[in-house]
Image: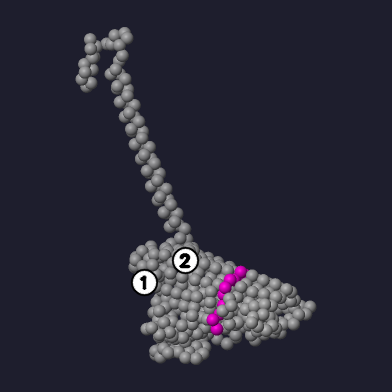
Amino acid sequence: MERNKNTANFDRRPFQMGERPFYIFEILTIMKMTIFRKTLLLTCCICLCNVMYLATAAAQKVDETYISPNKYKSGSQSERIQKAINEAKKSTGKVVIPKYDAVTKKSVWLIDQAILLPGDFELELNNCTIKLSDKCRDNFIRSANAGLAIKDIAPAKNIRIIGKGNVLLEGADHPRATGDHNKILSLNPRGFGQSYGTDAGKPGENQKGGWRNHAIILAHTDVFEVSGITLKDYHGHGLVLERCTNGKVSDITFNVRQAVTVDGADKQILNQDGMGIRFGCKNIIIANCKGKSGDDFINIGLTDTGVGAGEENVNVVSGSIYRGEIDNISTIYLQNWQDFYSISHRSIRIMPVGKLRISHVFIENMVISPLAQQGLVVEYGEHVQGLFVRNLISHQPIKAKGISQASFRDIIYKGRGEAIDVQPSDTVILDHLMCIKKE
């Protein structure tokens, strides 16, 4: 008897010996396919759940690692950055400022006040541009322990400012004030005593420059790092370290021109030194720096002007009063600088003025640009104990008159006149000085 061709109706009679039970095989095949499909669907669901879990876990881990100002939807860019820092201070200890501000839909972070950093904190600048607004009369970044009217500065510890990628800190288009504490603000500055500022002549506004014009200040900070940043057209000095210890500065580029263009005309900005290493700094490495400054590319030292911490009309926020031996400067390493110079002053200046003493300064692997006005200059050489210069190329002579404890080795001088103005002795070593006379 033939099997019914309608596959939906199976012959119910017992099959005979030798006949193939087709309907059993078909049922088993259908069952296997159903089980397979269910298993595959279950597997896909499990995999999807795992992916969602891992993605959520990763997002939570990022949130646990750092905080971004993009987290906050209200407030100015300055306020949102500081909100992130204040929250991270209690949790992650790290804030990342990204390239893009997702709230304002802009790629420039325009700040009205200094970014204040507490101790035990890391600020990562990730491919971002931070610009001072025309309202700002303050630093880009400052350790939070110091500021206007803060007379007693509590020590800070473990502060890191890390630039990753292309990081730019740029001055205002119309700065309220520029120059150091000796400069008078003017809308049309002239000579060596005036510097541009829109606060010039305004009642109630300080008519001189000062520490608020510097780009980055760390004061009374032990263990720190600043790296990977370009400082452009800042208003006073670039990076100022005051009574800081056990730190590292690296990969900083300075780019200024001692002027700002306002309504198509250049207005004079004075100072714009690169770095200031001030009273009390000890055990600091400064490596891989380049670019051009206005005044001294680096100035190691400070003059006691008798002005205390937190006051205006002073060049340092922690005060320019020499407190004795604790404020001496020692063990400073300048390493691997390439193509750097000052537009108008010294490339490297060491100045232990008055009672200040400086010891153990190591300068090595340096190429000073031929555009430099002056090279390495040591003032009050009798107050310097231990200056070690090695592997230096300069187009300007080394000036270190009066120094009594120093070593100068492997120097190439490409210029006119004598390469160095010191006399060798048992404690002043001159070794391998090559002079290539300039026609």
Q: Is residue 339 magenta?
A: yes
The C terminus lies in which quarter of the figure?
Answer: bottom right
Query: From what the image shows, is residue 158 above or below residue 18?
Result: below
* Colouring rule applied to residues: one colour
Q: Earlier in the sequence, mark 2 or mark 1?
A: 1
Residue at coordinates 30% horizontally, 15% vertically from top-left? 21
Q: Which residues are magenta?
A: 334-344
What secondary structure predominates along the stretch shown in magenta? strand
Number of marks in picture:
2
Q: Is residue 230 magenta?
A: no
Q: Which mark is residue 166?
A: 2
Residue at coordinates 23% horizontally, 21% vertically from top-left? 7
Q: Nearer the viewer, residue 63 or 167?
A: 167
Q: Which mark is residue 76?
A: 1
Q: Position of residue 282 (x, y in %)?
A: 63, 73
Q: Nearer the viewer, residue 149 or 352?
A: 352
Residue furthest to the right in view is 426
Going by the numbered disc 2, the residue's amino acid type is: Asn
Residue 17 visible, this orientation: yes
Q: Mark 2 falls on what kind of element? A: loop
Query: From what the image shows, is residue 47 above or below residue 242?
Result: above
Q: Position of residue 133 (x, y in %)?
A: 40, 77
Do labels 2 and 1 touch, CB within 8 Å?
Answer: no
